[in-house]
Amino acid sequence: MHELYVSCHGELEAVLFSRVRCRETAADICQEAFVRLCRSEDLSTVGNLKAYLFRTAQNLLIDYYRSQTVRSAAIVEWPEDTQPEVEDLRCAETVALGEQDLDRLIEGMTSLSPLCQRIFYLNRFEGLKQREIAETLNISLRTVEENIKKALVHCAKTLDEDE
């Protein structure tokens, strides 16, 4: 497989580039062709691996063109002088109710342990994954999972209490 890659990669990518006129797309299709070849169960029955690789790339190229056709058909062109009408849901009452809910949540979070608060903050506001939080705080993944669950249940209960 390594020899095939070394001997055919540049040629295959050049052929693909001549068809799509985009280096990144050609590189992506080329890489996917090699990945599919690597994932093939049994290549012993294939007589010419290079031809098989190029055929795989050609099939991927056809799939690419099909997806581009579907995408271009789905794109809606808005006239420049008009904007699509969207209902504005930011009325004063909705904003005030949302702020009240947020205040209740923040106040309710103070009854959770500092560790639980920190884990919840890192997960929901910093966007860290559970494993990243565990590594950052040097705690077990299970502890992170349990604390996120505890915080979410607590938030749900806090919002339900006042309704």
Image (cartoon, rainbow, N blue to C red):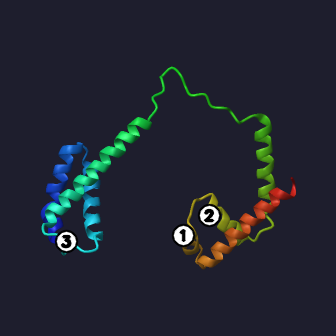
Between 88 and 33, the one nearer to me in the picture: 33
* Residue 75: % across, % down: 44, 35
Residue positioned 35% across, 40% down in the render: 69
CB of mark 2 within 8 Å of CB of mark 1? yes
Element at badge 2? Answer: helix
Along the horizontal axis of the image, is 67 left or right of 161? Answer: left
Which residue is identified by label 3? Answer: 1
Closer to the chain start, of discs 3 and 2, is 3
Report the residue that reaches farthest toward the front.
45
Q: Is residue 101 above or below residue 46?
A: above
Q: Earlier in the sequence, mark 2 or mark 1?
A: 2
Identify the residue shown where x is 22% and y is 53%: 58
Q: Amino acid at mark 3?
A: Met
Tell whether 25 sits left or right of 19. Answer: right
Q: Which mark is residue 122?
A: 2
Q: Which mark is residue 132?
A: 1
- Along the polypeptide, which appears first: circle 1 or circle 3? 3
In the picture, measured across the screen, residue 82 lies left or right of residue 51, that is right
What is the crowding at mark 1: few (fewer than 14 residues within 10 Å), some, or many (at least 20)? some
Which quarter of the rendered picture does the N terminus lie within?
Answer: bottom left
Q: Amino acid at mark 1?
A: Glu
Element under label 3?
Answer: loop
User: Distance between the Cα atoms at labels 2 and 1?
Assistant: 9 Å
Give amino acid for label 2. Answer: Leu
